[in-house]
Image (spheres, rainbow, N blue to C red):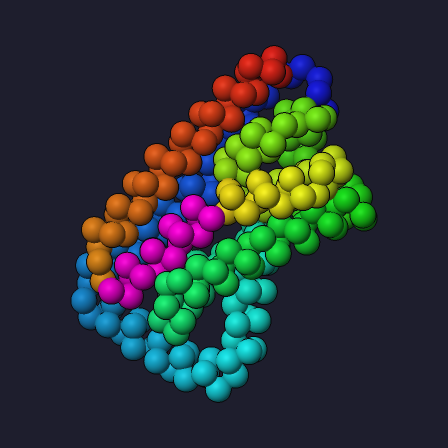
Amino acid sequence: MGKTISKFSTEAWLPTTKRRVLVIILLAAALALVTSFAELHARLISLLPAAEAIIREQSVLGVVVFVVFAALSAMLAFVSSAVIVPVGVYVWGKAASLLLLWVGWILGGVTAYTLSRYFGRAVVQVLLPRSLIERYENLIPRRAPFGFVLLLQLALPSEVPGYLLGLMRYHFWRYIAALALAELPYAVATIYLGAGFIERRTYLLIGVGIAVAVFGGVALHALHRQIAKRKLI
């Protein structure tokens, strides 16, 4: 950490930060496509009442499963909470689903941070490629200020910062604050994607996709500028 790296390695690093934004954009496009086919959309929506009946019978378990799944999606690259969001919005509404999703993502980030801080590099290397860990470590200042960590949370795939900052033993409560602030806009976007799909509002889906693209692009650009300012490239 803290050593100078080449521009080449930075350019190799930057595209991986776009994956989170790309996933939401592709999800928005896929949902918009599905809503354009009335019969297909109706068949998918017809499954929601059955899911609601199951959740209503086991209300506490339903909440726990939703939050745990959201937490796992914040820890593991191959798990996406987008699968369960339409069900949550249908059953609990947008506000409650947003809170549950946000809490789940925060819990996932805290778990990732705790695992890496107390169990070390050996555990992290099981979950993230070694080359990825080393690449990011070289870009993060040893005493990163809060604003830099917030940009890191906004720009990186959600499962990465917790592991990295845990390895660095970054201040826990500052990490939590940055995590909560960074996850909120993405949680709002994901919830509105779910609501737009249920309500068959294609323009809302497209609008959310564009907004996320702009927001993620600005965050990525700002992070790149901060790295350049610190003479890490």
Relative horizontal placement of residue 62, taking residue 27 as reference (left or right):
right
Q: Main secondary structure of the magenta part?
A: helix
Quadrant of res 61: bottom right
Q: Looking at this rendering, what residue extends furthest in the bottom direction?
A: 57
Q: Is residue 23 visible in the rendered structure shown here? A: no
Q: Quadrant of the N terminus?
A: top right
Relative horizontal placement of residue 83, taking residue 131 as reference (left or right):
left
x, y (%) of residue 147? 56, 30
- Residue at the spot x=29%, y=66% of the render? 198
- Residue at the spot x=55%, y=47% of the render? 180
Quadrant of res 201: bottom left
x, y (%) of residue 59? 51, 80
Q: Is residue 135 above or below residue 55?
A: above
x, y (%) of residue 130? 70, 37
- Residue at the spot x=63%, y=28% of the render? 145
Tell me where the magenta segment starts and ends, as one range.
Answer: 184-199
Q: Quadrant of the C terminus?
A: top right
The magenta stretch spans residue 189:
yes
Q: Is residue 40 visible in the rendered structure shown here? A: yes
- Residue at the spot x=68%, y=35% of the render? 133
So how many labels did they put on this image? 0
Relative horizontal placement of residue 57, taking residue 121 as reference (left or right):
left
The magenta stretch spans residue 139:
no
Given residues 63 and 72, the one toward you in this image is 63
Given residues 172 and 65, the one toward you in this image is 172
Q: Is residue 175 above or below residue 233?
A: below
